[in-house]
Image: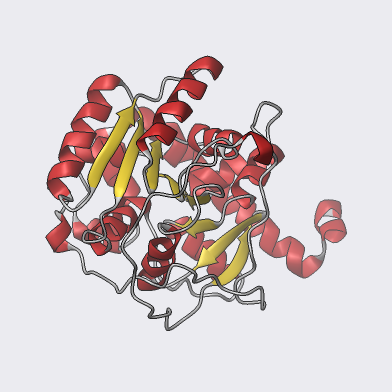
């Protein structure tokens, strides 16, 4: 019933974009807004000055269709073709470690959390790329008259990014889960993507002191890509807090990806994913998430429905009714 994680050869390899590719703020794709810096974050003067890890150049081909921005429950989401997203992230791998690019993926659950927590919403909006994942995001966009170009799920997009850059001499670091999980995930990632070097790994049970140790280990490993799998909202909060200390060109919050790599979870059947119901496969394997889906999904529909009415009736008329 459930499917294994594909290997690198199973993914198409979009042509990576040039390292300096960055869309202009022309109304199609606005530049990101920096996330609030936590009090203990390092300043620019405190950052080490070690040069960026060397990386073979990517192709100079630019995306054929630039992303566009939309807002769902106050979270700015980048709507892009899958190939375009891979090209943009491939370019970011060759960026400066002094200014890490952050990549988040949001679904109905993440947007519910952001709707209830303005600080978390600011964290999400501080990322360079926030991609929409799931049927809830697609429905919310349709209420705005927008048809989502591609469903950008981190469980698919990150492996596609790895496959597309398998011959560039890239290094990645894995952060999250317990020791057994992260060890299994790292071994499996090395098997799936032999063109990538596993620069290091670290468990995700971190207090403030352990977080600083983890940051030091990450920086010493000089990866091009940091994958953080701690679950929402912890992984995004952690990246926003330590962004100023990290020396990694690209950092991605990947949710349950390590569980798939470790074999704790298996992908739902393709037909279930095609109809936007992969959450049923997750719920079958992780029944403790029943509240998230069985209560959270109706709550999300209520929130986007209310936002749609407010946009047409006006917030004052809606509250009066």
Looking at the picture, how far across and down is residue 315, in whole percent? 82, 58
Above/below status of 147 relative to 261: below
Residue 254 appearing in the image? no
Nearest to the observer: residue 154 or residue 245: 245
Relative to 286, is 214 on the left or the right?
A: right
Relative to 3, is 33 on the left or the right?
A: right
Nearest to the observer: residue 283 or residue 97: 97
Looking at the picture, how far across and down is residue 236, in whole percent? 53, 39
Q: Quadrant of the C terminus?
A: bottom right
Q: Residue furthest bottom?
A: 64
User: Residue 214 appears in which quarter of the rendering?
Assistant: top left
Nearest to the observer: residue 226 or residue 294: 226
User: Residue 294 appears in which quarter of the rendering?
Assistant: top left
Above/below status of 267 relative to 184: below
Number of numbered labels in the structure image = 0
Which residue appears at 87% of the width and 57% of the height?
A: 316
Nearest to the observer: residue 142 or residue 126: 126
Which residue appears at 17% of the width and 42% of the height?
A: 190
Residue 102 appearing in the image? yes
Looking at the picture, how far across and down is residue 76, in whole percent? 62, 59
Above/below status of 45 relative to 304: above
Chosen colour scheme:
secondary structure
User: Residue 31 appears in which quarter of the rendering?
Assistant: bottom right
Looking at the picture, how far across and down is residue 26, in whole percent? 66, 78
Relative to 187, is 226 on the left or the right?
A: right
Which residue appears at 38% of the width and 63% of the height?
A: 90
């Amino acid at each position: 019933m459930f499917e294994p994680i594909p290997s690198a050869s199973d993914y198409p390899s979009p042509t990576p974009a040039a390292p300096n590719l960055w869309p202009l703020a022309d109304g199609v794709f606005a530049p990101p807004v920096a996330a609030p810096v936590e009090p203990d974050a390092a300043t620019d003067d405190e950052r080490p000055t070690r040069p960026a890890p060397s990386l073979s150049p990517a192709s100079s081909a630019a995306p054929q269709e630039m992303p566009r921005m939309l807002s769902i429950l106050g979270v700015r989401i980048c709507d892009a073709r899958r190939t375009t997203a891979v090209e943009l992230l491939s370019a970011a791998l060759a960026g400066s470690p002094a200014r890490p690019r952050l990549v988040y993926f949001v679904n109905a659950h993440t947007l519910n959390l952001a709707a209830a927590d303005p600080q978390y919403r600011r964290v999400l909006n501080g990322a360079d790329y926030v991609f929409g994942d799931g049927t809830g995001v697609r429905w919310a966009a349709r209420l705005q008259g927008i048809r989502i170009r591609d469903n950008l799920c981190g469980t698919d997009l990150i492996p596609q990014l790895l496959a597309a850059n398998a011959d560039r001499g890239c290094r990645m670091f894995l952060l999250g889960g317990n020791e057994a999980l992260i060890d299994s995930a790292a071994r499996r990632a090395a098997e799936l993507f032999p063109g990538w070097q596993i620069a290091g790994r670290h468990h995700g049970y971190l207090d403030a002191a352990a977080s600083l140790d983890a940051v030091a280990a990450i920086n010493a490993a000089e990866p091009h890509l940091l994958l953080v799998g701690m679950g929402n909202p912890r992984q995004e909060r952690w990246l926003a807090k330590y962004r100023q200390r990290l020396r990694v060109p690209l950092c991605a919050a990947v949710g349950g990806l390590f569980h798939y790599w470790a074999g704790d979870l298996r992908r739902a059947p393709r037909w279930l994913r095609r109809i936007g119901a992969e959450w049923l496969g997750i719920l079958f394997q992780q029944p403790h998430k029943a509240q998230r889906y069985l209560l959270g999904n109706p709550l999300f529909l209520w929130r986007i429905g209310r936002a749609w009415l407010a946009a047409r009736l006006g917030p004052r008329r809606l509250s009066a009714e």
